[in-house]
Structure formats: structure tokens, C-alpha cells
Image (cartoon, helix red, strand yellow):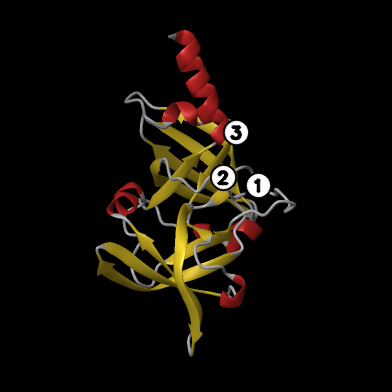
Amino acid sequence: MFTGIVTDIGIIRAVELRGDTRITIGCSYDPDRIEMGASIACSGCCLTVVAKGSDADGHWFAVDASAETLARTASGMWLAGRRLNLERALKVGDELGGHIVTGHVDGTGDVRGIREDGGSHRLTISVAAALAPYMAAKGSVTVDGVSLTVNDVADQPDGRAEFMLNIIPHTWAVTTLGGLQVGQSVNIEIDVLARYLARMREVIGG
């Protein structure tokens, strides 16, 4: 489990095909404090540490991503040089600063608009019809691993939904959200409570 509070920004050093895809990520985490097999959320995708170390370029860890993971996450995110939001798994007793995040990407969204709003930035993201029912004003959503509150939702005639987020200067500066471009694909995880409510309604309604 995670909270959607980013604790580091990693940079993909290398991507190698080894059956699955081995991804080496540079980070500031001390490798001596990372257990082999530990889970780290990489821009919202929970992956398992399979190697770690330090060299002249700094600390790093490596993960293996399956074809399923690559297919379900944002296009272009697993390229050398790409910056990733990192969060280590929640420990019992840690502060729950965001909301409960599983690290399982439900789908992707497309950035439709970015504009300054006071000192903050207004971000508009479009999601497919399958995710649209889970977007609710004042509800929680995880975008590229960042816990955020939905400001508003606009349902579209084709079943898609556009939702708006207000990104404060701190979040804009300490996550990869500040580097987003219009048209870019992002990872989306819906609120786990919304998932269970939808399932309950499905069962009761059936």
C-alpha cells in the first residue's frame, strides 16, 4: 500500500529486454535501506526491487516490468531519461498524508489542458468511458502516483470524462507533474473506495 505522497523523483538509467523488461532507475534512496523484493511505486505503478546498488552516478535500483505492465501504463513512460515519481511502501504507523493507493494502474488519461491559476496550476485530464464513473468532484484520484483531489468533472457525449485538478506550487515543484505537456499520457488509479462502492452497487442491483 501507498499514500500517493511522492518521496523522490527517479530517472530511468537503462531499459533492457530480458524476457520481461529490466528497468534501472537512479534515485536518492540509500540502497542499504531497500530490501530486495521491496515494493516501490514508480509513477503510480507498484514494482518489485530485483537489484540495487551505488556507483559513480549515485544510487539506483532495478525492477522487472512485464508486458502487461508496459501495456497498461502510460505510453512513453519506460524510456531512458524519463523522470518518475517514486514512493516506498507504507509501513504500519506511517502518516497517511494522501489517500490509500494500491499501486495498481487502472488505466491512462490524456492531459487536455494546463493553465496557471494564481500561484497554482489548473490541470485537465480526459479518461475513457470505463473510468469516467469513478471520477467525482471532491473525490480522490492518483495521477502518475500523486494523490490529488478532483475539483470538477465534465461528462462528455462519447462517455469519456474530463476532470480538473488544482496543483499547488509545492506539488508542482516536487513531482513530475510540473513537466507535463498537453497531449501527454498519464497513469490513473481510481479511489479504492469508489471501486468497492461500484462493485456493491453492481451486486445489489443484480
Q: Position of residue 131 (x, y in %)?
A: 42, 32
Check contact, mark 3 vs mark 2: CB within 8 A. no
Question: How far apart are the two marked residues, 1 and 3, measured between alpha carbons?
Answer: 12 Å
For mark 1, what is the residue? 98
Q: Which amino acid does label 2 sit on?
A: Val
Question: How far apart are the two marked residues, 1 and 2, measured between alpha carbons?
Answer: 8 Å
Marks 3, 2: nearer the viewer? 2
Please give the count of numbered marks on the rendered protein.
3
Check contact, mark 1 vs mark 2: CB within 8 A. yes
Marks 1, 2: nearer the viewer? 2
For mark 3, what is the residue? 139
Q: What residue type is labelled 3?
A: Gly
Q: Position of residue 41 (x, y in %)?
A: 51, 56
Marks 1, 3: nearer the viewer? 1
Which residue in the rendered view is the most extreme toward the bottom?
Answer: 56
Let me know if residue 151 appears in the view. yes
Which sits earlier in the primary sequence, circle 3 or circle 2? 2
Residue for point 32% across, 26% down: 158
Q: In the shown orientation, is residue 35 left or right of residue 126? A: right
Residue 148's quadrant in the figure?
A: top right
CA neighbours of label 1 inside 10 A, class few (<14), some (14 to 19), many (20+): some
Residue for point 43% across, 48% down: 187
**Element at badge 3?**
loop
User: Could you say which is closer to the camera, residue 149 or residue 94?
Assistant: 94
Residue for point 47% across, 56% down: 43
Label drawn at residue 101: 2
Quadrant, the C terminus: top left
Q: Where is residue 166 in the image (x, y as percent from the top left)?
A: 59, 45
**Element at badge 2?**
loop
User: Could you say which is closer to the camera, residue 180 or residue 50?
Assistant: 50
**Element at badge 1?**
loop
